[in-house]
Amino acid sequence: DAGVTQSPTHLIKTRGQHVTLRCSPISGHKSVSWYQQVLGQGPQFIFQYYEKEERGRGNFPDRFSARQFPNYSSELNVNALLLGDSALYLCASNNPGQGPFSGNTIYFGEGSWLTVV
Amino acid sequence: QKEVEQNSGPLSVPEGAIASLNCTYSDRGSQSFFWYRQYSGKSPELIMSIYSNGDKEDGRFTAQLNKASQYVSLLIRDSQPSDSATYLCAADSGGYQKVTFGTGTKLQVIP
């Protein structure tokens, strides 16, 4: 079975531009989360979507937005890019319906490396 | 602010030794804990999950949880150079899915 897939894997953008990152969850998983990982830090939670609804939002500015589609894939959008947005963006999926604990185990995709110049 | 704390390292151990990685968390409501391994330039890979107090073993890996002390650890027996990576500790912060990560501990296994 395919794992979490993300695209693009690498991209370079200029300050002020916007970017769209895409993610397909593991088959059968209905929840998608987005994380930002800056070099030397752990992943920071951005958004979580379940059944196409936003269920959680981290401490990120409104320039960051996301959505989930009927097939459970997801997009992360970042507007007005800043140099500080350069990071590895990770998509993770899980299936909360699996149970009170095991459903919270998240599996990451390979990530999208974003460089803002 | 719900936090997960780890020593950034690097932790250096000789090949064949036991590597001990530690983590503390601040949210007493956390119920699920995870260890991820991250090689340089790669995404995190799940190694272990633990939900109950005590030890959980999987091959060369043992996760330990002490909820009273808010402490999680990962032991790697017979460490190999291929174990050299950053190990991320994470705690489920509640809700559907909000997992909080530590900054990671860099492990170096010396041949």
Image (cartoon, coloured by chain):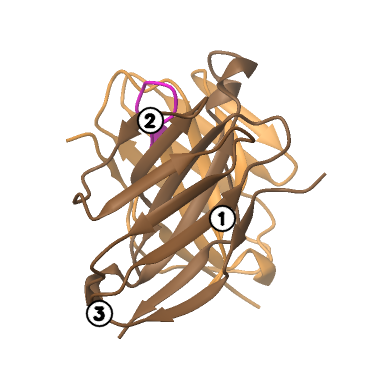
Tell which residue pokes out farthest to the top in this image. Answer: A100
Q: Amino acid at mark 1?
A: Arg
Q: Identify the residue under disc 3.
A: A15
The answer to whether dots 2 and 1 both sit on one chain is no
Q: Identify the residue under disc 2.
A: A54
Q: Position of residue B101 (x, y in %)?
A: 37, 45
Decide which of B97, B7 is in the foreground and name it: B97
Compared to B6, does A50 lie above or below? above
Q: Specify start and end residues of the magenta stretch as a single range.
A: B91-100
Q: Position of residue A84 (x, y in %)?
A: 23, 71
Measured in 3D between alpha carbons, the distance from the residue under mark 3 to the one under mark 2, in whole angstroms, is: 27 Å
Residue at screen point 55% across, 28% down: B50
Any magenta on residue B72? no
Q: Relative to residue A95, is residue A85 drawn left or right?
A: left
- Chain letter, disc 3 residue: A
Near mark 2 (Cα within 10 A), the count class, few <14, some 14-19 or many ≥20, is some
Near mark 3 (Cα within 10 A), the count class, few <14, some 14-19 or many ≥20, is some
Instruction: Please report contact status of discs 3 and 2: CB closer than 8 Å, yes or no.
Output: no
Residue at screen point 52% across, 27% down: A104
Chain coloured orange in this rendering: B
Tell which residue pokes out farthest to the bottom in this image. Answer: A117
